Amino acid sequence: MADGNTASGIDYDITIIDPLRVEAGCSYIVSGSFNLQVPPLPDRLFDYGNGVCDRVATVTISGYTFTFLM
């Protein structure tokens, strides 16, 4: 777990769910997930996949999952 605040003074907490993994020869995080809490906003769950070297990840907010490219 980590916490901190942004330059504008907004507090946040990060909890690693599955360790983030990188591999030699891949420019992206290949697997792992973490939860980002920025009260009073809804939690955000970031998921980097299952080990495939691609730039695709997801974020889930309030039950809705969005795909994004790193």
Image (cartoon, rainbow, N blue to C red):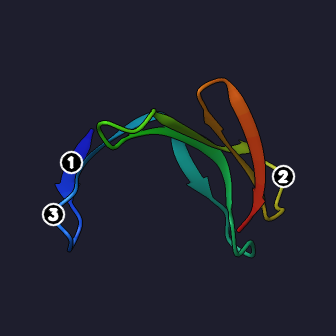
Label 1, label 2: how far apart the Cα atoms are = 29 Å
Q: Which mark is residue 52?
A: 2
Of the two numbered discs 2 and 3 in the rendering, the one whose residue sits closer to the viewer = 3
Q: Residues within 10 Å of mark 3 (few under 14, many from 20)?
A: few
Tell me which numbered mark, 2 or 3, is placed earlier along the sequence: 3
Residue designated by label 1: 3
Label 1, label 3: how far apart the Cα atoms are = 12 Å
Outermost residue on the top side: it is: 63
Residue 17 in percent (x, y) is at: 48, 30
Residue at left offset 18%, top offset 55%:
4
The type of residue carrying mark 3 is Gly
Answer with the quarter of the image where residue 28 lies.
bottom right
Residue at left offset 15%, top offset 63%:
9
Front one among 10 and 27: 10
Of the two numbered discs 1 and 3 in the rendering, the one whose residue sits closer to the viewer = 3
Quarter placement of the N terminus: top left
Q: Residues within 10 Å of mark 2 (few under 14, many from 20)?
A: some
The type of residue carrying mark 2 is Val
Label 3 element class: loop
Q: Residues within 10 Å of mark 1 (few under 14, many from 20)?
A: few
Label 1 element class: strand
Q: Is residue 24 above or below residue 68?
A: below
The type of residue carrying mark 1 is Asp
Answer with the quarter of the image where residue 30 lies.
bottom right
Residue 67 in percent (x, y) is at: 79, 50
Residue at left offset 20%, top offset 74%:
7
Residue designated by label 3: 9
